[in-house]
Image (cartoon, rainbow, N blue to C red):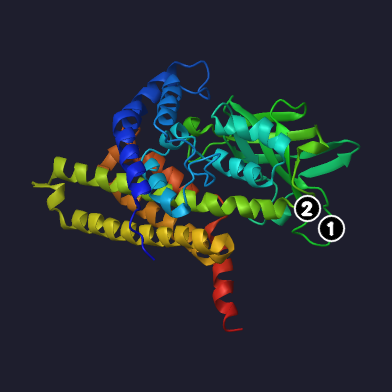
Amino acid sequence: MDFAYDARTEELRAKLLAFMDEYVYPAEPVAEEQRAQLASPWETPAVVGELKAEARRQGLWNLFLPDAEYGGGLTNLQYAPLAEITGRSPHLAPTALNCAAPDTGNMEVLYQFADEQQKKQWLEPLLAGEIRSAFAMTEPEVASSDATNITTLIERDGDDYVITGRKWYISGAMNPDCKIFIVMGKTDPDGADPRRQQSMILVPRDTPGVTVKRAMQVFGYEDHSHGGHAEVVFDHARVPVTNLIGEEGGGFAIAQARLGPGRIHHCMRLIGMAERAIELMCQRAVSRVAFGKALAQQGVVHNWIADARVAVEQLRLLVLKTAWMMDTVGNKGAHTEIQAIKIATPRTVVGILDKAIQLHGAGGVSQDFPLAELYASARTLMLADGPDEVHQRSLARRELKKYL
């Protein structure tokens, strides 16, 4: 395995690092100021549109999608260090590059499984950054870590499907630019195979019977820059049968295909969050004095920074190995590695951010530094895309299978 960045990756890294310095970091306070002046906090600040236009002009657009016709034409191994860079400003940079969740996963679903009409109607405007989307899977009444528990019904009625159910923590759904939901529900709730009961269907936001009820908070944050995380009710929402993605009963398989790349993208960005935390730790340590010495001279601070550096280097190698395996043997072949990074990365980055917050004192939990919000994001990823315990269970079974 050779993890040296190739020429194409180095070129894009240099361009993206310059883009971050020149445009993204200066835009962070501007975006917050503009959002405060908007009629609704869910609207998109003008500076975000400016960033998107500049990113597209520079060719930093849709880098996540490996098909060169639609996206950057990059492998997972080439995309990994780029996603890491965007993770340094996770609430702004991915959106600027049209590489933000949940749109990336939704675009991958449409790219892989949608028919030509569905691609024209929904994939093309998503790729152009003209609209946003949401993925409606998690439900409040059941343990959604087990996707077979989902209770939302997708019932055939002539030439239509009727969707009934309640979802929550539907990322991006509060954004008025969100025009389409990919909804997972059961078309065959009594089917013998619990993994063939679910299907996925396209439900436009303006469909009668679709109600975005409220924004769910995450550690007290409404996450305006991400488009929020909404509770959404589908009350006999009716859409044409042509809105079904793939075949009836294919929803579970589509979800697994969607979540593989999504998990590694999150882990790539988490490493960027950790790098920014280390940077902030070092800046704080050399600029503050406590008990007669700079914090940078305190032994415990040395330990925190050293441990953080070691941990980040370990995580990066594991993520790069996973990306390489996904490229060479596919998502199924990289199953163990995908689960390993999903377990290790958020847990480790949460620890690094915790120490960075501690080093900043009261400032660490304030709005004056990004650390508290980064911490909330990283901690949430121990639940998102499947809680860590589900991945531990699956990974342990795979290990034990060798001995049974």
Residue occupied by mark 1 = 191
Residue sticking out furthest to the bottom:
403
* Residue for point 52% across, 22% down: 43
Q: Is residue 357 found left or right of 203 in the rendered image?
A: left
Residue 285 spot, x, y in % from top left: 18, 46
Number of residues whose C-alpha sits closer than 10 Å to that of mark 1, classed few (under 14), some (14–19) or many (20 or more): few
**In this rendering, does residue 132 appear at all?**
no
Q: Quadrant of the C terminus?
A: bottom right
Number of residues whose C-alpha sits closer than 10 Å to that of mark 2, classed few (under 14), some (14–19) or many (20 or more): many
324 and 148: which is toward the camera: 324
Residue occupied by mark 2 = 249
299 and 319: which is toward the camera: 319
Residue 48 spot, x, y in % from top left: 44, 25
Dot 2: element:
loop
Q: Are marks 1 and 2 in contact (CB under 8 Å)?
A: yes
Considering only order in the chain, which callout, 2 or 1, is on the residue closer to the N terminus?
1
Residue 290 spot, x, y in % from top left: 14, 45
Dot 1: element:
loop
